[in-house]
Image: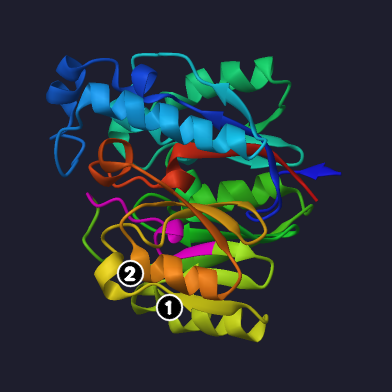
Amino acid sequence: MQSVQSEVHPVGRILLKHAREAFESQEKIEQEWRSLHYLQAPDFDKAVRQYDLLASALEKEGISLHYLPRDNTSLDSIYLRDASVITDRGAVLCRMGKADRRGEQIALRAAYKELQIDILGEIAAPGVLEGGDTMWLRNDLLAVGHTYRSNPHGIDQLKGLSANFFDIITIDLPHHKGPSDVFHLMSVASPIDEDLILVFSPLLTVRFREWLISNRFTLVEVPESEFESMGINVLTIAPRVCLMLEGNPTTKQRLEEHGTKVIEYQGSEISAKGMGGPTCLTRPLWREV
């Protein structure tokens, strides 16, 4: 059986946007990186090489890769998870909370048509919603973060589109570094298995942390020293098999102590400088359940 309403079951197909198509050139990078609040300007050639290695790592795990074309959107389009939410009844195209990213849904609409994925709906103003604020906790339960990138209007529209075939719980997130920062629900939690979740507890609400514990999740804690280096941002490609940015040895060890296979990738240009880890870089299209 195939479903996309999971963060942990084995990935069969995945949608990507290669650094070559998102970044386009060093000139484009130099024009945009400051206004997009990147930490530094990525090196185009190095980013392309790193992305090739990332794609190779996914293929080695038996995952079928699909790519979005170049479409003259911003550098941030490399982080394509944010532009849609996919359910078993089709995709919801997002209206991005980061204004520079609006318009990415146009390319996604065409890609989903080609991939024969129905469009369930689209978030409209004044709603904003980003895919990084959505996280499947069960096949029938989607957590959605209320952040600067996803507001109550957008969340209510998503609830309307769910049509009672899955439930939504809203998780309030703190101000943290403010509206210009990249801060989503998946910045503080990443499911590793149906009963195992990676968390950064200092930025979890007490209510959500207690909910996870009461629903029998074992919490693996990311140390404060590895939060900024995106130790929290991992892509689970099968139960207790995950992809993470290199440079987070304590988090890696803690995951391994819970029986998790950790695959590291080099992401100084495609992840660290734009603060987008492997979940941000990918949009699973279906998983085996």
Q: Which percent across, then down, holds residue 131?
A: 50, 45
> What's the residue at 50%, 80% (across, down)?
209
Determine contact: label 2, label 1, CB under 8 Å.
yes
Query: Which class describes the residues within 10 Å of circle 2: few (<14), some (14-19), or many (20+)?
Result: some
Quarter of the rendering occupied by the N terminus: top right
Q: Is residue 6 left or right of residue 123?
A: right
> What's the residue at 38%, 17% (across, down)?
21
Q: Is residue 85 left or right of residue 118?
A: left
Residue 34, relative to residue 280: is it above or below?
above
The residue carrying mark 1 is: 205
Of the pair 70 and 85, the residue shown nearer to us: 70
Q: Is residue 186 magenta?
A: yes
Start and end of the magenta stretch?
180-190
Amino acid found under the numbered disc labelled 2: Pro
Q: Which mark is residue 125?
A: none
Count of marks placed on residues: 2
Q: Is residue 264 magenta?
A: no
Of the pair 1 and 161, the residue shown nearer to us: 1
Residue 67, relative to residue 61: is it above or below?
above
Q: Which mark is residue 174?
A: 2
User: Please, what secondary structure does the residue beneath circle 1 have?
Assistant: loop
Residue 111, relative to residue 285: is it above or below?
above
Q: CA distance from mark 2 to mark 1?
A: 8 Å
Amino acid found under the numbered disc labelled 1: Thr
Q: Which percent across, then down, holds residue 48?
A: 33, 24
